């Protein structure tokens, strides 16, 4: 009887876990749609800003924004690492953090120092344990990213780049391909190549009246473009998080169902064996009498 009770307890425990994972799956589905809409909405804005900045840069070739100036020898680099605040999303954070650690080891082998900005609690915790030089971090972003919370921590690296203290800034996050597939990516944020701000030549050339002057407008547009890229990366990461969590919770729910089936089969076999043994004892006793 003790074995029967233990199996029944395990079945109830797994059933409770399955209810939790099923609920988390449904919540992830609801949040995933909103996160994907937010991610898709962020793409046209960055593209539009890039085109306008490109037109102005072509019209004013004598001025080069500091973000587009290459520093030559790579002495110090910056990494913006975007992860999630919560877990239970499969190997998403593990994959992007593996990409970051490989990059940091490559820097170390080349004698390049690295400053890191951590966006997300999982990445901040890992990088502090890893011994990385975390210059700033932002966590608990919630389900909706807010640009004003991202600008401050990232500005530490961009200001250092303008002051020639950092020679390169890379952006590491999880890129959303589709609901089933997300991949870790690493992009060079600064310096921006000349092809990055190249205007869309298929569009009609536009003449802009700049107030107060073209240089000030280009500075603001390029800064807004970099901020839009960072915001888009965070939005992509959040969409990937909800999709990965949905898949992970669905797999956990399916596995819980399989475990319940195995435990139920084991329970029925044990019960049938016990009944058979009791019948055998009764028949043997009657035959002896």
Image: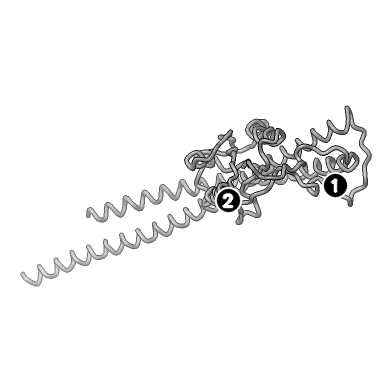
Q: Which residue is mark 2?
A: 106
Q: Looking at the image, tell me whether mark 1 or mark 2 is earlier in sequence order.
A: 2
Question: Where is residue 152 drawn, in percent x and y?
Answer: 65, 30
* Furthest residue toward top: 212
Q: Is residue 221 visible?
A: yes
Q: Residues within 10 Å of mark 1 (few under 14, many from 20)?
A: many
Query: What colour scheme does the image use?
Result: one colour
Residue placed under numbered mark 1 in the picture: 199
Residue 117 at what x, y percent from top left?
60, 38
Q: Quadrant of residue 64?
A: top right
Nearer to me, 165 or 56: 165
Q: Position of residue 289 (x, y in %)?
A: 5, 69
- Mark 1 lies on a secondary structure that is loop
User: Going by the image, does 117 lie left or right of 209?
Assistant: left
Q: Is residue 34 visible?
A: no
User: Quadrant of the rendered structure where residue 233 is?
Assistant: top right
Q: Quadrant of the N terminus?
A: bottom left
Picture quadrant of residue 237: top right
Q: Nearer the viewer, residue 204 or 158?
A: 158
Q: CA distance from mark 1 to mark 2?
A: 34 Å
- Residue occupying image coordinates x 85% and y 33%: 215
Left or right of 275, for residue 137: right
Task: Left or right? Give the position of 287 relative to 18.
Answer: left
The structure residue drawn at horizontal position 26% and vertical position 64%, both measured from the top left corner, is: 272
Q: Secondary structure at mark 2?
A: helix
Neighbours of disc 2 within 10 Å: few (<14), some (14-19), many (20+): few
């Amino acid at each position: 009887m003790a074995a029967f009770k233990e199996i029944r307890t395990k079945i109830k425990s797994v059933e409770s876990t399955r209810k939790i994972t099923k609920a988390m799956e449904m919540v992830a589905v609801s949040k995933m749609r909103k996160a994907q809409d937010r991610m898709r909405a962020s793409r046209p804005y960055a593209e539009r800003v890039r085109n306008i900045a490109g037109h102005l840069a072509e019209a004013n070739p004598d001025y080069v924004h500091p973000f587009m100036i290459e520093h030559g020898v790579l002495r110090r680099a910056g990494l913006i690492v975007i992860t999630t605040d919560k877990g239970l999303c499969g190997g998403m954070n593990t994959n992007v953090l593996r990409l970051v650690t490989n990059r940091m080891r490559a820097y170390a082998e080349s004698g390049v120092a690295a400053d890191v900005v951590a966006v997300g609690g999982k990445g901040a915790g890992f990088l502090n344990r890893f011994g990385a030089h975390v210059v700033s971090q932002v966590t608990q972003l919630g389900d909706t990213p807010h640009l004003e919370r991202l600008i401050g921590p990232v500005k530490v690296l961009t200001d250092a780049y303008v002051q020639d203290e950092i020679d390169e800034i890379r952006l590491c996050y999880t890129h959303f391909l589709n609901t089933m597939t997300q991949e870790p990516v690493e992009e060079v944020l600064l310096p921006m190549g000349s092809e990055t701000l190249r205007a869309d030549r298929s569009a009609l050339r536009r003449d802009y009246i700049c107030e107060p002057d073209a240089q000030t407008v280009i500075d603001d547009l390029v800064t807004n473009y970099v901020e839009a890229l960072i915001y888009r990366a965070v939005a992509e990461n959040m969409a990937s998080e909800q999709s990965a969590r949905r898949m992970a919770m669905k797999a956990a729910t399916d596995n819980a169902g399989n475990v319940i089936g195995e435990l139920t089969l084991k329970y029925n076999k044990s019960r049938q064996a016990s009944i058979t043994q009791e019948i055998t004892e009764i028949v043997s006793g009657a035959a002896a009498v």
